[in-house]
Image: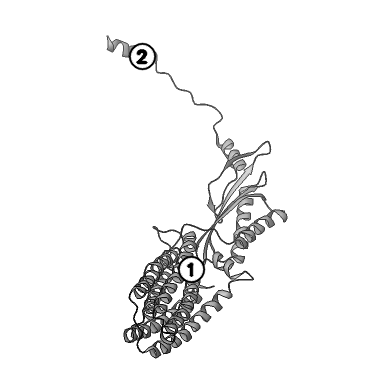
Amino acid sequence: MTADGSTKVVLIALACNFGIAVSKFTAAAYTGSSAMLSEAIHSLVDTSNQALLYYGIIRSKRPADARHPFGYAKELYFWSFVVAILLFSLGSGVAIYEGIDKLLHPHPISNPEINYMVLSVAIVLKSLSTWRASTAFNATRVGQSAVTALRGSSDPALFTVLLEDLAALVGLVVALSGIAAADMLDLPWADGAASILIGLVLAAVAAFLAIEIKSLLIGAAASVETQTSISRLINSENRDGGQVRAINHIRTMQLGPNDVIVAASVDMQDGALASDVEAANARLEKAIKVQHPEVRYLFIEVQSAVAAGPVASTTTAAPANEIVLPAKTVAESAAVSAPTSKPTLTSRPQSARKGKRNKRR
């Protein structure tokens, strides 16, 4: 999913939630419904959440600088985590509080027709937003189940909007059922019970979001498919008679929805020259970035073993376009540049030593 696609999903949800929030607050003020007030607060929280997600998307697009050399892509993860906290504290907390208060102090709902009308319009608008978010999400599933795709997604803006919209649709149906029970069956406590149920649904969604976004925030690896593909590309260098002998490890980190950093450690063939290493690095960088444009940073650690034994030394991680000399070449260069004889210290003349002794006397 491109960043522009996620931005459109967030902006559509923002517009829908704002209109729904205004209508719900108006209906709650006229009717005194606790479930409607909970839904109004829920929509207001959703509107604020979409605004924060949009802010996070804009901030994450800033270019890298000296303070943040890998860019600001993770800022979207931070603001998404803030959204999960707000959804739990404000959306869920206030809804449960309002429901408990209504159970302790039940009162009939006035003008329930207004609630029915507002909830019906809200369901239509929320269905539009949910359809747009689910369409964008399904395009990224690639045959995976919905739960697996949600847990493996690296775009919190997309799956946060989707889960919020689904929770909102459930909440609207629950609120409509509670208001109808309080109105038609003369069960005033049903309105409060519906508010509590809405709060529990929001709490469950917020907890799921917090767990998944925390994983991204602290540095989750790229998808298994991406890691497998990169491993296959590096191994192809070996199969095609290239310089790579074996892969020691491949480590990845998801910096943002479309930003991945890759650090790979490989063994080169014995006797590989610096020009061979440079050419292999160039081929690997081109192949990986063509198939995976989301790989913004690629580092390859090169190791090479001398013929008589195990790896002699390991170079530090370096970008793929940087020439890294293998250990054997470095050792040969050092042997060539080493001096053939040790320098000797010249002794001072005897007269100088004698003069020093006479001075002491």
Rate crowding at label 2 as few (under 14), some (14 to 19) or many (20 or more) other CA atoms within 10 Å.
Answer: few
Residue 146 position, x and y percent, is 58, 70
For marks 1 and 2, give the one nearer the viewer: 1
Q: Is mark 2 on a helix, strand or loop?
A: helix
Q: Name the residue under label 2.
A: 353
User: Quadrant of the rendered structure where residue 197 is?
Assistant: bottom left
Image: 235 above or below 89: above
**Mark before the other along the chain sequence, 1 or 2:** 1
Residue 295 position, x and y percent, is 55, 62
Q: Which of the two residues, 318 or 105, is positioned nearer the viewer here?
A: 105
Q: Name the residue under label 1.
A: 156
Identity of the amino acid at label 1? Pro
Q: Which of the two residues, 353 or 198, is positioned nearer the viewer here?
A: 198
Q: What residue appears at the point 66 percent right and 36 percent down from the top-left corner?
A: 309
Inter-mark Cα distance, 1 to 2 = 81 Å
Identity of the amino acid at label 2? Arg
